[in-house]
Image (spheres, coloured by chain):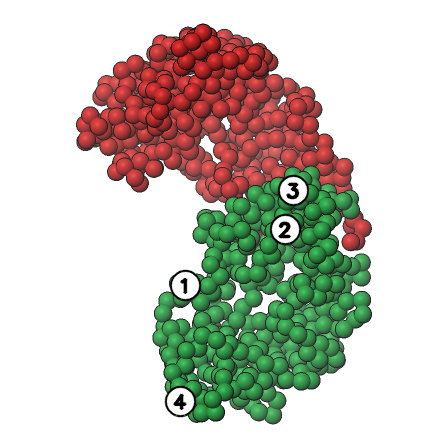
């Protein structure tokens, strides 16, 4: 229970359904004041209080579990290391994979609980399939697709059939004070939302060049290649405009040479995506090519694709090119379904390419 | 929403929703093993509180209602002084243990340093309550204090020789020493009179936090030789929010709170007349009945210790096996996490503690256990059971019945944590 409206309503629904529910708030920082200090986010003492009050109103026991060390190692350190390696991590996904449905779930199972209930917006029905929420704007199946079959078998997502508006209305009906609490959007462990500043504090200044992919010219400098994301256009501060006057985007980040490469929008286009460490939510590895849709970033639009397994990697051949695909993000394969698109599996994006144009700018290069 | 899945632990969990069953006003229906956190008010103290709360008057006013209120305060002061072996003028009413500890440590430090700027050293035991510990550390950080921590032995008893050495080495620069009368976590009773004697020999005032001791072991302020002593209401059957610092007549103490000049000008603030009357009632009853209480509660505690040892072979009793508070039993359960055990026992309607409470709800390994030489795992695996005036043998039976299953689950959780460490 983060202290937000979703987990409060999820807990209330689980209790109402007859489960014996115990509320758990995760302490993710040894010093809560060092993380977010406003009303948003998930880590403050105020949020812990909101979660406690929700548990009071629902009528369930409530405890704070200390996951600060695990969170720091598995999520925060990983986040910094990924950026340092030129990739763009998704810390919420990592937190689900390593904390909420691993450290918390393992502890809960050991203590005799059966499952972890969360307020994620995704559907997990009796058929065991993970599907998008009915509220596509709030759908969080993308950050849950990393869960294994075993993890999903011990997970309950009571909100998947409801829109966010329904959840808020229900919270108000249940007298939960968090009914009107603003959504959290930013990364919970970056207090002011300034990711670049956070990374700068962790990794220090490492000045380097910004190079134009077309001409090979140095067109600017940066204070650390880690601060850039493939597809980024703003904040490049380039000294010279491109010859054709068109905007330039970050095409790749090369940590070895500390170089950020920029170029025109069309150079961002990729149509093949290679993913490492695939997880097949259905439990079995696809034997043949699968026609499906893939989502390549949080809140990204799905793209039709053919997915297959090759040397233990997930390979997605996109039916139409996608732009700004960053290594470190997840590629999630969905099977379109009128009852809610079904998650087939996911993997961490390692490399991308434009088919027939080997050596063209690949996000993050090869790692 | 799927229907509830099969509960593989059905016997343990089903139908036991603790929040649904809990009745805060039904002491007889709960297993409350956390009297060191707070203990129920004595009926006489509650009656005294309610009766006095109906009466009007600010004890500092000069008119009849004020004089009446003041009379109730002074009668209470005399009762408490008599019960604790102090003079009435030595009883300074405060809001409780934390304030009394802060006032003693900071106030005596400031007053002694004002007289002699060389006196900036504090001698403190390593097992003090956070109200003392954090006050000392605040003085180190903000007031240039230095500190000598007195080590404890394996059962949590302060090493007297360490005080002797510290006084020999630093005697002329010591502002005060502070050693609790009895430890709030492991229950070990400290040799306060011996420590106070050493301090007195060097002209050093000794403060002692006797919050857990009064009502459980004999406490005589004058006889102990201490310069200041902390006592609070809610640990002995009085209300929460009222306590006292017993401060020797000749001990200078700079106030924390400035204002109306109440309480010898050491502690300003309108006096809480009903709280003080109820506090005095509780102190008087607790001290008068102490020997009988210690025998009765001590025998239930002994049964608890024996029962826990039988139910959980391998459980380790922490603290002094003999010289301890009669209501205290403190164990380490190897392989378990204390907070997991607490959760599991709570689900069975059994209330206990992992030690001293913590602000953010995140358990830190106990500094008391660590000072006693325990490693991090043993410190985290500990659980405190404390008995009080309402305790019954039936509560011990409930604990002993629930403990094996809880320990088994907590060990599983501990194994999960160890495997990932």
Q: Which chain is rendered red in the image?
A: B
Are tags 2 and 4 found on a single chain?
yes
Q: Position of residue A65 (x, y in %)?
A: 57, 46
Please state which of the two labelled residues, at mark 2 or mark 4, is closer to the viewer: 2
Q: Check contact, mark 3 vs mark 4: CB within 8 A.
A: no
Q: Residues within 10 Å of mark 2 (few under 14, many from 20)?
A: few
Q: Check contact, mark 1 vs mark 4: CB within 8 A.
A: no
Ranked by sequence position, the earlier of labels 1 and 4 is 1
Residue denoted by label 2:
A180
Q: Check contact, mark 1 vs mark 3: CB within 8 A.
A: no
Question: Which one is in front, B330 or A92?
Answer: A92
**Residue in the image at 36% along x and 9% along y:** B87
Separation of marks 2 and 4 at Cα, in angstroms: 52 Å
Q: Chain of mark 1?
A: A
Examine the rendered structure and indicate whether residue A57 appears above or below residue A42: above
Q: Chain of mark 3?
A: A
Q: Which chain is rendered green in the image?
A: A
Q: Position of residue A120 (x, y in %)?
A: 67, 58
Residue denoted by label 3:
A55
Residue denoted by label 4:
A217
**Residue in the image at 28% along x and 18% along y:** B251
Residue denoted by label 1:
A202
Can residue B72 be seen?
Answer: no
Please state which of the two labelled residues, at mark 1 or mark 2, is closer to the viewer: 2
Q: Check contact, mark 1 vs mark 2: CB within 8 A.
A: no
Please state which of the two labelled residues, at mark 1 or mark 3, is closer to the viewer: 3
Q: Which mark is residue B193?
A: none
């Amino acid at each position: 229970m983060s202290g937000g409206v979703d987990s409060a309503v999820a807990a209330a629904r689980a209790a109402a359904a007859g489960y014996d529910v115990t509320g758990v708030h995760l302490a993710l920082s040894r010093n809560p004041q060092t993380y977010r200090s406003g009303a948003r986010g998930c880590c403050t003492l105020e949020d812990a209080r909101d979660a406690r009050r929700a548990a009071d109103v629902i009528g369930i026991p409530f405890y704070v579990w200390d996951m600060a060390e695990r969170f720091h190692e598995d999520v925060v350190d990983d986040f910094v290391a990924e950026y340092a390696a030129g990739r763009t991590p998704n810390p919420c996904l990592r937190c689900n994979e390593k904390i909420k449905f691993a450290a918390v779930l393992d502890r809960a199972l050991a203590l005799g609980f059966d499952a972890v209930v969360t307020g994620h917006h995704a559907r997990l029905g009796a058929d065991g399939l993970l599907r998008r929420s009915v509220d596509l704007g709030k759908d969080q199946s993308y950050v849950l697709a990393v869960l294994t079959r075993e993890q999903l078998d011990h997970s309950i997502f009571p909100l998947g059939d409801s829109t966010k508006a329904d959840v808020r209305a229900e919270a108000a009906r249940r007298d939960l004070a968090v009914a009107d609490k603003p959504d959290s959007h930013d990364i919970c462990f970056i207090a002011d939302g300034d990711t670049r500043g956070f990374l700068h504090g962790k990794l220090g200044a490492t000045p380097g060049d910004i190079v134009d992919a077309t001409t090979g010219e140095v067109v600017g400098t940066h204070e650390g290649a880690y601060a850039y994301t493939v597809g980024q256009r703003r904040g490049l501060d380039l000294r010279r405009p491109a010859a054709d006057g068109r905007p330039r985007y970050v095409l790749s980040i090369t940590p070895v040479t500390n170089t950020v490469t920029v170029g025109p929008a069309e150079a961002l286009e990729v149509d093949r995506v290679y993913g490492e460490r695939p997880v097949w939510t259905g439990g079995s590895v696809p034997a043949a090519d699968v026609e499906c849709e893939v989502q390549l970033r949080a809140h990204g639009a799905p793209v039709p694709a053919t997915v297959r397994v090759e040397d233990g990697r997930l390979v997605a051949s996109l039916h139409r090119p996608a732009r700004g695909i960053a290594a470190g993000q997840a590629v999630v394969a969905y099977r379109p379904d009128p009852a809610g698109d079904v998650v087939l599996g996911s993997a961490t994006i390692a490399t991308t390419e434009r088919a027939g144009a080997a050596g063209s700018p690949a996000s993050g290069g090869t790692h | 929403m799927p229907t509830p899945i099969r509960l593989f632990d059905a016997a343990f969990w089903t139908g036991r929703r603790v929040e649904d069953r809990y009745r805060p006003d039904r002491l007889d229906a709960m297993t409350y093993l956390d009297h060191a956190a707070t203990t129920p008010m004595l009926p006489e103290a509650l009656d005294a509180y309610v009766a006095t709360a109906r009466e009007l008057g600010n004890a500092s006013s000069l008119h009849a209602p004020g004089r009446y209120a003041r009379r109730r305060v002074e009668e209470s002061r005399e009762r408490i002084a008599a019960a604790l072996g102090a003079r009435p003028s030595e009883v300074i009413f405060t809001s409780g243990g934390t304030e009394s500890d802060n006032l003693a440590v900071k106030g005596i430090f400031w007053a002694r340093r004002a007289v002699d700027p060389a006196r900036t050293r504090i001698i403190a035991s390593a097992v003090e309550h956070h109200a003392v510990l954090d006050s000392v550390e605040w003085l180190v950080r903000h007031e240039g204090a230095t500190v000598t921590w007195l080590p404890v032995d394996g059962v949590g008893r302060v090493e007297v020789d360490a005080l002797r050495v510290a006084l020999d080495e630093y005697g002329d620069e010591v502002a005060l020493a502070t050693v609790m009368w009895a430890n709030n976590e492991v229950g070990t009773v400290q040799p306060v009179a011996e420590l106070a004697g050493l301090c007195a020999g060097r002209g050093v005032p000794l403060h002692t936090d006797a919050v857990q001791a009064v009502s459980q072991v004999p406490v005589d302020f004058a006889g102990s030789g201490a310069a200041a002593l902390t006592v609070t209401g809610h640990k002995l059957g009085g209300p929460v929010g009222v306590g006292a610092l017993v401060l020797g007549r000749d001990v200078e103490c700079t106030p924390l709170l400035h204002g109306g000049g109440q309480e010898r000008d050491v502690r300003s603030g309108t006096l809480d007349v009903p709280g003080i009357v109820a506090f005095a009632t509780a102190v008087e009853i607790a001290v008068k009945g102490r020997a009988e209480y210690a025998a009765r509660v001590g025998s239930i505690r002994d049964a608890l210790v024996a029962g826990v040892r039988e139910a959980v072979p391998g459980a380790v009793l922490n603290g002094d096996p003999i010289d301890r508070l009669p209501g205290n039993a403190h164990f380490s359960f190897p392989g378990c996490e204390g907070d997991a055990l607490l959760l599991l026992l709570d689900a069975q309607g059994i209330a206990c503690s992992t030690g001293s409470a913590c602000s953010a709800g995140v358990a830190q390994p106990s500094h008391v256990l660590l000072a006693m030489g325990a490693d991090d795992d043993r410190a985290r695996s500990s659980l405190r059971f404390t008995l009080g005036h309402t305790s019954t043998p039936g509560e011990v039976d409930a604990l002993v019945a629930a403990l094996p299953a809880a320990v088994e689950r907590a060990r599983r959780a501990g194994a999960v944590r160890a495997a990932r460490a």
